[in-house]
Amino acid sequence: MKSKAKPCSKCGNLRIIWKNVGGEKLCKTCWSCQSGNKGIKKSTKPISPRSSKRVKLDADYSKLRMAFLYANPMCAAHLPGCGVQATDVHHKRGRGKNYLAVNTWVALCRSCHSWLETHPKEAKALGFSEDRLVNNEEGD
């Protein structure tokens, strides 16, 4: 259905009516120039950057991560420039459904983790990355 041009109550030009505010039929230009757009109610509550479900997952991950790094304090990669002490958790199969799957984690230092993330083919050849689509018999 195609809209017909009608006269705007404010400017009088034949245009497609954008809003009907208190009986006044306004085109888009006149409506946007209207002071405050009183008929529009704006939300005052900001949208949360993380869902409540994600907040719970992140809390669980934080606890598991601390325990994992405590149990595995040394970097598993030992690549050139290695910092020796593990500070990061690398997810060999990505973080999606394996976010809390400890059997897919590797303890790494920041330097080695950055290198493995920027060199995915080499990471896979060295055994630090795996296909995400492969069934995980231990975790499933």
Image: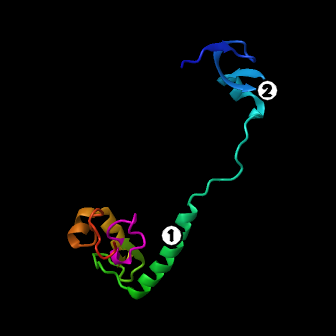
Q: In x, y percent, where is residue 46?
A: 66, 53
Q: Is residue 13 left or right of residue 111?
A: right
Instruction: Work out how far the residue at label 1 is from the one at label 2, CA to CA, in angstroms.
Output: 48 Å
Which residue bears the numbered disc 2?
Answer: 22
Q: In x, y percent, where is residue 47?
A: 62, 53
Q: The N terminus appears in which quarter of the rendering?
A: top right
Comparing 68 with 122, the one in front is: 68
Q: Residues within 10 Å of mark 2 (few under 14, many from 20)?
A: few
Q: Residue at x 33, y 73 (%)?
A: 112
Q: Is residue 109 above or below residue 13?
A: below
Residue 57 image label: 1
Magenta-drawn stretch contains 93? yes
Dominant secondary structure of the residues highlighted in magenta in the image = loop
Q: The C terminus appears in which quarter of the rendering?
A: bottom left
Q: Is residue 68 left or right of residue 80?
A: right
Magenta-drawn stretch contains 104? yes
Are the residues flagged by discs 1 and 2 in contact, CB closer than 8 Å?
A: no
Q: In x, y percent, where is residue 22?
A: 79, 26
Helix, strand, or loop for circle 1? helix
What span is in magenta? 91-105
Q: Residue at x 71, y 43 (%)?
A: 42
> Label 2 amino acid?
Gly
> Label 1 amino acid?
Leu
Residue projecting furthest to the left: 125
Q: Give the mark, 1 or 2, whose residue is nearer the N terminus.
A: 2
Helix, strand, or loop for circle 2? loop
**Residue 99, located in which quarter of the rendered image?**
bottom left
Q: Residue at x 42, y 82 (%)?
A: 68
